[in-house]
Amino acid sequence: MKKNEPSLQKLQNDSVPYVMLVPGIIGIFFVNIIPSLQALVMGFHSDSFTARQTFVGFQKFTRVLALQEFWQVLGNTFFWSFATLVFATVLGIIAAILLNRPYPLKGFFRTVFLIPWVTPPVVAAMVWKTLFNETLSPINDVLLRLGMIDNPIGFLANPSWRIGPLSVPMLSLLLVNIWNVFPFMMIMVLAAMQSVDASYYEAATIDGAGRIRQFFFITIPLIMPVLSISLLLQGIWQFNSFNFNYLVAYGGPLNTTKTMAVMIYQKAFAEFDYGQAGAISAVMLSCVVIPAVFYIREQLKTIDKR
Amino acid sequence: MKSYAKRVRFIARTVHYGIHYLLLAIIFVFAIFPYFWMLMTSLKPRELLLAIPPVWIPKQFDLVHYLDVFQRMPFLLYLKNSLYVATVTTFFCILIACLSGYSLSRYSFKGKKLSYGLFIATQLVPGVLPLVPFYFTLHALRLTNSYTGIILSYTTWGIAFCTMMLQGYFKTAYSVEIEESATIDGCTRWGIFFRIALPLARPGIVATAIFSFLLAWNDYIWASIINTSGQYRLLSNGVQDFQSQFGNLYMGRTMATGLLATIPALILFSFAQKHLVSGLSQGAVKG
Amino acid sequence: MRNKVIAAMLIVLLAGSVVFAAGTKEPQAKSVSFWMQAYGDRAEQMVAMDTIARNFKAETGITLNYEIIDWSNAMNKYSLAMRGGESPDVAEWFFLTSFAQMGGDAYGPLQINDVAEELGADSLYYDAAKLECMIGGDYYALPWRMDVRIMAYRKDMFDAAGITKVPETWDELVQTAKRLTTTDANGNIQVSGAAYYITRGDFFQSSMATMAQNGTSVIDLNGTKALIGEPKAIEALQFMQDLVLKHKVMNPSHASATVDTMQEFLSGRIAILLGANPDAIKMQQASAPQLDGKVIGARLPSKQGGTSVSSIMYAAPVSIMKTARDVDAAKTFLKFFMRDENQLLISKATGLINANKRVMANEYFESQWFQALADQANFALNGDIPVPFWSRISAFPQGPVANAVNQILAGSNVKQQAEQAAREIERIIAEQ
């Protein structure tokens, strides 16, 4: 860059980007990329990890796609991601709007609203299982006392009412997930809102725009970059969702709350069929690749700007 | 006429306040009710645990479940393990992610897009997928049942996401001109990194550190496969062990465990969360 | 200045973490590692194992490192161990034949005919228990506890309904359950007269018990064909479904495998629990002490009654692994663990009956509950059929048969589900 720079220092300076990247890249290679590739390769083998491992081509894939459970679970996963995103974002935005105003106690509320996100999944699953327990649920207790229902609702026990992926257990689990996810959306939106320049709003008020118009025409467009990134990230995370779907009801009853990640886990451990697990993962990755490519393209457009 | 307008404004404002706090209260109940239930159940005397209809607030508080928990679970050991693992993970993760994130944010070099793509690709993978092959790698290196193995796992999981976050912060925390003038003054790239980038992006770094800590604190599936020995067991696994099939049979204990397991995280978090918002708003995309 | 302080702190932290991580090494003294599953009330189990470990060290100088593994992790751990993952020296486990085949030559249980002979295993243990520990006539494990499934009922609810006779046949069970079932104005069941016990997240084991009550099973003992698609098994599965749909003595939510029927039983929403496991009494003492004396055990009713088999049982095999670091030390521990006094100690702590006939003669097992368990043991089939692919059939939770049973209890056509499960099993058999 500078003309009279000694060549050693230039070499040193030029190598800095690579040197900085090396630890990170090595790390993700060994813990993430290589094992994931290994797991995907297992999708083409039978009896993985044993001495009798054999290459079976696409046999595992065809077996997996022929399972009725597979399609049900795939539908569940898409529905799960979509519904979580929609409701958690709406709730998050509402909470962010409320917390953005300079009313007293907003710091306190902000702290409390973040608690669901900080709760370990194990603990959250445990307590929500109790809250959804047909006999012991306080939710049922309240509803019964108010006379809104005649019988306790079997939140996690009743797979009979079902339209595609929509069922009572699925809705119950969605409630748990929204409880857990909305603080993330809230905090992202709140942070974005707080970095919007106040002068925009002042100018709009002078021009006579009401608060609602200001929200839709100033706030939303300006927080859109952050919001869209958060939505995309959360969408991918939720597609891969494992924790609650496994811990609360093992994907039951009758696979109504199962997501793809749970199915992978069960095929791998309960049925010892790593081949099928690898095949399912390959399918999952191909679903996620398309939105991911969009994300990467968007990001790559901006990274070269200095 | 003036006082009429004042009254209208006063009523309007009160209604505004009312709706504001009503909505806040509803969300508050939604967010906090599970904790309320955990607390009450953990204090119920044994006979009331399975009562129908369920008891909301027991007339007498009984601490027996907490005593039971400490008798059956080396709680402090698990807590220490989790704290240790999460702290060391955060330390190394932030260290490495700052380096990678800064590199991706400011420099342009061959292979940048590829590296970028790699970091993002790791986000797409469900956590359970690389678990078993990696377990065998760790086992071959004799790193299962140790702190090192699990810290290694969590750190690298965190690096992918934290790098992404940090590269955004480095880009928006300060303008390029500051760096350019420093270069003209003769500062090396490393010098810029340590003296300009890190200090100016500090809020963002703190926010990322919080994410990383939570990642390590909340995980259970990797730890359950990689560690077997009770000596290295983490808190979330200890809690999970406790549940037998459904946990409802020992409900008082499981609720007590749940509360005890979350409180340390909550305490740490309440100190840190101020930085979370300021850090995030600093890093929020400004274009 | 501040940056320097921060830098110094970070260096101290880094150094400390390196030292810390490096400081944890494997114990130098002779030691044996032992994995055991969690039973009953953990505290008592831990106390008993600590006592055994202490006495073992005092007598032999060998340190015992035991781990209590929760059932939900156990399957993962052992399946990884059989493929070369982490493995204990001695393990108290299950699916012996399956894991042995999985482990192949390098991993898995060690043949221990010598230890068995020294302990006089042939005459010391109950037949059904021995069977679960043998592969091809050789001992690959020794049995310690016995897990028999029985019928548990609430005496207080029986008294309130004026019932004095305990049901012994399927018809009697239905009649008794009808008298105990209460419904509300809309016809919804408030209290189920009878319901099945869920184990390991599904109804698989309860369905096996019911099939045993009709004289059949999931597969034949040699593992050559599936019996679940045959009329007798279908009849048994139909009986299970009838309790929900036809006789209406079981609330549908008690048939969904996501509800803890033991909890429902203890909170008074189920009167008769079919297929309760032995540590039910421990659970009752821990979470419903007000029911002391009100939970009674009895033999499960079979279709015809009389002396027919009506249940299943498991004996936990304790094996030494081929990968044990010190096989002699492991054998010493196994012999120590199997001693009468230690078996009595651990059985008392876990509330389970024992496979050792001498131990069972102890007066501790004279309580009503234990006598009921011992009685049922005489009329029970082996729950784990010793064929290598058993682990795939009975994978938990929700293996292929368990899924079929879940569907059946939710109202699916019994014949269809049973035949589908049979096809799945035939496919697994064909792959062998």
Image (tube, coloured by chain):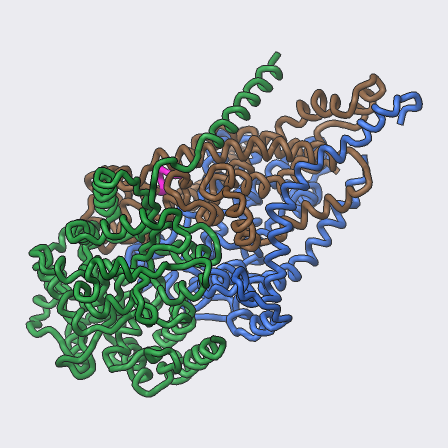
**Which is more toward the observer, C85 or A151?**
C85
Quadrant into which the N terminus of chain C falls: top right
Residue at 72% in and 25% down:
B193
For the colour green, the matching chain is C
Q: Quadrant of residue C251?
A: bottom left
Q: Is residue C7 magenta?
A: no
In the rendered view, would you say C183 is above or below B222? below
Vertical order, A186 against A74 (above or below):
above
Question: Which color is chain A depicted in?
Answer: blue
C303 or C140, nearer to the observer: C140
In the image, taking residue B188 as reference, residue C370 lies left or right, namely left
- Left or right, A303 with respect to C4, comes to right
Image vertical order of residue B61 relative to residue A35, above or below: above
Q: Residue at x 17, y 80 (%)?
A: C308
Chain B, which colour? brown
Q: Relative to C384, is C342 on the left or the right?
A: left
Q: Position of residue C143 (x, y in %)?
A: 25, 61
- Give coordinates of residue C119: x percent, y percent: 20, 58
Q: Quadrant of residue B168?
A: top right
Asked which quadrant contains residue A202, the reply is: top right
Query: Residue C166: where, in percent of width, then height?
Result: 11, 73
- Residue A201 visible, this angle: no
Q: Residue shown at 65%/46% (left/top)? A: A29
Main secondary structure found in the magenta portion: helix
Q: Within the magenta stretch, is there residue B260?
A: yes
Task: Give the left or right position of residue B278, taking residue C158 as reference.
Answer: right
The residue furthest bottom is C231
Magenta part of the chain: B258-262
Q: At which x and y percent is residue B240? A: 38, 48
Choose between C380 and C187: the one closer to the eye: C380
With respect to residue B259, does A232 lie above or below?
below
